[in-house]
Image: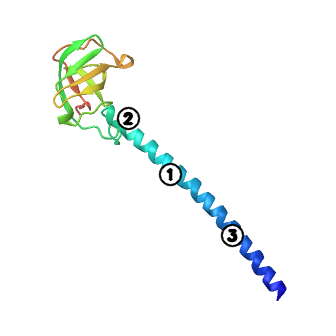
Amino acid sequence: MQQDLQGMVNRGAELAAKLHQSESELAMVSERRDQLERQVSNARQTLQENGLSLQSPKTNIPEVDGVVTAVSDNLVEVSIGSDDGLQKGHELEVFRADQYLGRLKVVSVTPDRAVVRILKDYARGIVQRGDRVATRLKLDS
């Protein structure tokens, strides 16, 4: 009987130690969850402050086209904007008739206009007012 009692005491001590360990692990996991929730909240705020969404601009590009309305140095204003689905970070191709002029990256957007930056690595000509822009080039078959 004494041996049974000692066994129960030992078992109780083991269970208490496991409970304490589990409570410690739960506290660490809860703290980590809270930390991650704060990081996600900060990331969402940063996205919102920069006019971005959780959807990647690269995977959510609308098929739109427009016209260059103004050019100043390496910045270009185009006639399409957020009403057309354009977002900061999207890229446009710029061309004149059959001549490819380069690629542009959206730096700011209003409902009916966008300001884009000329990507020097893709520049193939001088962009002018009246040139065409599109998110996708249409190739004749």
Report x, y in % for residue 34: 49, 50
SS at circle 2: helix
Q: Which of marks 3 and 1 is nearer the N terminus?
A: 3
Residue ID for mark 2: 46
* Image quarter hosting the N terminus: bottom right
Q: Image point 30% across, 25% down: which residue?
A: 107
Task: Note whether 51 is above or below 32 in the view shown.
Answer: above
Q: Distance between the residues labelled 3 and 1?
A: 25 Å
SS at circle 3: helix
54 left or right of 129?
right
Task: Note whether 5 is above or below 19 in the view shown.
Answer: below
Q: Image point 73% across, 71% down: which residue?
A: 14
What numbered label is drawn on residue 7? Answer: none
What numbered label is drawn on residue 16? Answer: 3
Type of residue at label 1?
Arg
Task: Note whether 30 is above or below 102 in the view shown.
Answer: below
Residue ID for mark 1: 33
Q: Can residue 98 be seen here?
A: no
Report x, y in % for residue 138: 23, 32
Type of residue at label 2?
Thr
